[in-house]
Image: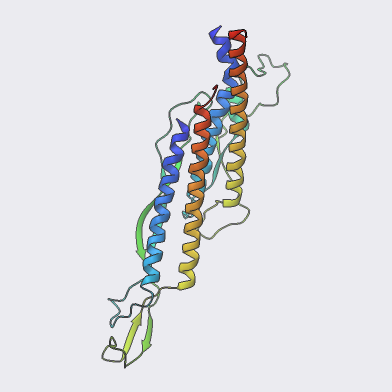
Amino acid sequence: MLSELQQMFSLHENMLNIRSRRAEIIASNLVNADTPGYKAKDIDFKRVIDNMSDEAGMLTTTAARHISDGNDMSDGEEMLLYRIPNQASLDGNTVDTQIENAQFTENTMHYIASLRFLDGKIKSTLAAIKGE
Amino acid sequence: MGMFQIFDVAGQGMSAQTVRLNTTASNMANASSVSSSIDKTYRARNPVFATVLNNEAEADVAFDDSDYQSAGVQVLGIVESNKALQTKYEPEHPMANEEGYIFLPNVNMIHEMANMISASRTYQMNVQIMNTTKQLMQETIRLGR
């Protein structure tokens, strides 16, 4: 019972974790907007989802002929990717404040969405337990 | 806990930008402090920013190969500009040297204004990041209520 509950929440819980990590990385980019030589980074989302797919109850393939869910990324790829700047700057900094800001906002909205989903699940579970 | 790190990072950004704003203010304030020798003349000061890699966050389910680090910012030091000082021939000036020259600081007002605006925008942005993060955390705490 407990593990089922855990599984129910784990997808959104993991999403919240990733989103908060991503917020951190983008905040790091924004803070370093004036640091010479700083390279803007971001999370490779596909890879992260791939990593957590087992726990989240997503499609996992156990044999070579199983249909893949499109998440197969080759191993050894870095989790953090560097952004490619639209315009090079003289001091080697690749932070584009506008893009980072947009990404931060987008990430925030996704975080809130995951929160709402999780909230809804918690509330419906509570309602089911209470039986009202 | 990922989100708490953002406060550190944004806080470091705010303090770095404050240093930048401070040096800009002193540059502008001293833009016309005349002196009679090259050595004593005020020179424009600028902070040098450098990235600080924060300690690696604890291992996570989704981040098993955690090469991930959040990056703050710090002021490594403040350097004086080595641009040439302005020299003016003003024999009547009380600060003029024996040859009748005075020396003016190498402060470029346009440069300083641009710096000031950039610093204040970045500061604002950091405040926004903190605010957003705070709201997200509050919502997370309220989860299920």
Residue A9, compared with residue A46, is above or below; it is above
Q: Is residue B81 visible?
A: no
- The residue at the point 62 percent across, 7 percent down is A131
Task: Report the number of numbered marks.
Answer: 0
Q: Residue A120 or B16: which is nearer the viewer?
A: A120
Q: How is the image coloured?
A: rainbow
- The residue at the point 38 percent across, 57 percent down is B19
Picture coordinates of residue A28, whole percent (x, y): 49, 44
Left or right: A82 in relation to B87: right
Q: Quadrant of residue B44?
A: bottom left
Residue B61, compared with residue A23, is above or below; it is above
Residue A63, compared with residue B113, is above or below; it is above
The quarter of the rendered structure image containing the C terminus of chain B is top right
- The residue at the point 62 percent across, 21 percent down is A120
Q: Is residue B42 visible?
A: yes
- The residue at the point 61 percent across, 48 percent down is A99
Q: Residue A76 or B139: which is nearer the viewer?
A: B139
The quarter of the rendered structure image containing the N terminus of chain B is top left
Q: Quadrant of residue A14?
A: top right
Picture coordinates of residue B68, whole percent (x, y): 48, 35
Q: Residue furthest toward the left?
A: B98
Left or right: A63 in relation to B27: right
Picture coordinates of residue B12, whole percent (x, y): 41, 47
